[in-house]
Amino acid sequence: MINQNDESTCPLCQQPNRCEVKKNSTCWCMSAEVIVPQALLDKIPSQLKGQSCICNACIADYHQQKAPVVNTQ
């Protein structure tokens, strides 16, 4: 388990989160279209909570896994 994190790393997958907030720039993570599910927030180890943003890939993967399966037959 990872015990340290920096603000540019996703606390879930340890990949770059590409957050631009600290750079005084508009960031994808602040968009009204981005919904970070509580289930993902709950997966962040307690020592990493509030340290950095979850990356867009983890958010997208979560939503894709929760999407209803459409039967095309």
Image (tube, rainbow, N blue to C red):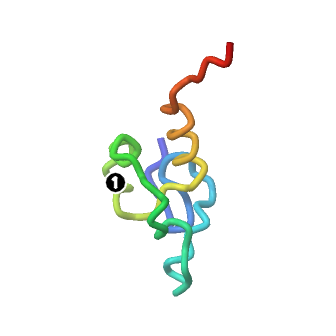
Farthest residue toward the bottom?
24
Q: Quadrant of the C terminus?
A: top right
Image position of 2 with respect to 66: above or below: below
Image position of 36 with respect to 63: above or below: below
- Identify the residue at image location x=50%, y=80%: 22
Apparent side of residue 36 relative to residue 24 in the rendered image (left or right): left
Farthest residue toward the right?
73
Q: Which of 51 and 58 is in front in this view?
A: 58
Image position of 55 with respect to 30: above or below: above
Apparent side of residue 73 relative to residue 47 in the rendered image (left or right): right
Image coordinates for residue 40, horizontal then vertical, percent? 41, 44
Q: Nearer the viewer, residue 30 or 21?
A: 30
- Identify the residue at image location x=55%, y=73%: 27
Image coordinates for residue 63, horizontal then vertical, percent? 51, 40
- Identify the residue at image location x=34%, y=54%: 47
Instruction: Tally the marks.
Output: 1
Image position of 24 with respect to 41: above or below: below
Apparent side of residue 31 relative to residue 60 in the rendered image (left or right): left
Binning the other alpha carbons within 10 Å of mark 1 as few (below 14), some (14 to 19) or many (20 upward) gives few
Quadrant housing residue 49: bottom left
Image coordinates for residue 59, horizontal then vertical, percent? 52, 48
Element under disc 1: helix
- Identify the residue at image location x=57%, y=46%: 60
Farthest residue toward the top?
73
Image coordinates for residue 38, horizontal then vertical, percent? 33, 46
Apparent side of residue 20 relative to residue 49 in the rendered image (left or right): right
Q: Check disc 1 and give the amino acid type.
A: Gln
Q: What residue would you read off at disc 1?
A: 47
